[in-house]
Amino acid sequence: MNASLTSTRPEPVRPAVLIVDDEPDLLELVSLTLSRMNLRTRTAPDVGTARKLLKSEPFDLCLTDMRLPDGDGLDLVAWIQENRATVPVAVITAHGNIESAVRALKLGAFDFVSKPLDLGVLRKLVGSAIRLGTGASDTSPDPSAARLIGHSGVMEQLREMISRVSRSQAPVHIYGESGTGKELVARMIHESGARRDAPFVAVNCGAIPTELMESELFGHKRGSFTGAVADKKGLVQTAEGGTLFLDEVADLPLHMQVKLLRVVQEKTVRPVGESREETVDVRILSATHKNLAELVAQGLFREDLFYRINVIELRVPALRERPEDIPDIAEAILERLGRRTGSQPPRLAEDALEQLRSYPFPGNVRELENVLERALTLCVSGVITAEHVKLRSTQRTSAPAPLPTATAADGAALGEHLEEIERDAIVKALEKTRYNKTAAAKLLGMSFRALRYRIKKLGIE
């Protein structure tokens, strides 16, 4: 073949990383490590030089030490957020100086790595940052991705915050009432960030028995306790490279809070029965409907863990705060229920919509879904009207109804009334705990066996 007819494709431009540090040995070590990852590197010994390079050249990541001759790494983080917001910045902190790392994350740093540098951790951090940069231009929506429904002002603000925190690796604490969609928000953060192709592992901290929690989260070695017949990988290791979502984190017992703190601070985990720690690369997201600050004041939640997982705080609004979103949410729920049953979703009549808008929904979106599922069962005409929408508030009066008199003639009526009260309490507890019977029994102050007996007796299932 004629050499003149062959075409040579230009080599793709390698991502560029700016390394800011005044230690020549560290600069050489990091530069060599990143060059082996097929990355271009530039170095700067101080803040001033780093700013000049950032103004004149494009970079895909900035990696900066905290202590520099002419300033602080935090100053450079703040400057980048203001002037080069599309460039992820990670900080190198002194060993044990986690407070500086937390301050950097609050200022907008992508992540942090501690000295002495663990090159494996460094490579994972840099890889995540580069993936974030290369995926930033992909704006095509994923039809299977989690999404929030509604166009109220509070929801638009929440979407904007999700977009911002997804570009970071900082721990995020999501709080809001039960049923508001905290796990959905966590999934959106994961799917919008650099870890979207890695696992998203959700853990309900209130549903794992205390005696099994350490093994479930961190794994165990064979023979470490009775019944440990093989090595087992924990949920933290299962989320390697991705996101670990700790739902109802307030339910973690204090001894587990200490172990979780080490995962957040040192990015290491020790399986039960193992003498050595393993490095892990996971982003921690947490959620609860409880007030963590109050639990800290009561001594029920560790203050140091609270500040580590609460670097960024997101509040998910209650449904009663955005009644204008109810029609869109209801339509989406009915479409999903229709697909599940293989039928055409019914239409909501205006009187039914009016009832839904005026109801406070203490159970939030989860309660709305239950209401619509019940209405769908009652509806036969293809139109859900007000008579199909059974809301708890419409069954209440300004004064509590008197109990029937307990005579021999109407003793059965009293028994039925008490059973109705008991049934309502159990149903509410099950809904609050997402139908986890162990957690519901704990909430009701009874044993699991007693709850199971009452559920069967009252015909709840």
Image (tube, rainbow, N blue to C red):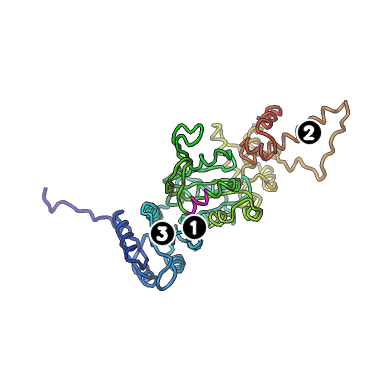
Secondary element at image label 2:
helix
Q: Relative to 115, does residue 427 appear above or below in the rendering?
A: above
Q: Nearer the viewer, residue 268 or 425?
A: 268
Instruction: Give the labeled residue for mark 2.
Output: 418
For residue 221, side relative to residue 253 (left or right): left
Task: Residue type at mark 2: give it.
Answer: Leu
In the rendered image, which quarter is residue 398 located in? Answer: top right
Residue assigned mark 3: 115
Q: Position of residue 444 (x, y in %)?
A: 69, 38
Decide if residue 135 is in sight here.
no
Q: Residue at x 75, y 42 (%)?
A: 394
Q: Earlier in the sequence, mark 2 or mark 1?
A: 1
Mark 3 in CB contact with mark 2 (< 8 angstroms): no
The residue located at (52%, 51%) in the rendering is 261
| Foreground of the two, 130 or 383 | 130
The amino acid type found where label 3 is placed reads Lys
Residue 262 within the magenta-colored segment of the rendering: yes
- The mark nearer the N terminus, 3 or 2, is 3
Q: Secondary structure at mark 3?
A: loop
Q: Range of the magenta residues?
A: 259-265
Q: Which mark is residue 164?
A: 1
- Of circles 3 and 2, which is in front? 3
Report how far apart the C-alphas of labels 3 and 2 lie in the structure.
Answer: 64 Å
Q: Is residue 461 magenta?
A: no
User: Measuring 51% from the left and 39% from the top, which residue is drawn there?
Assistant: 215
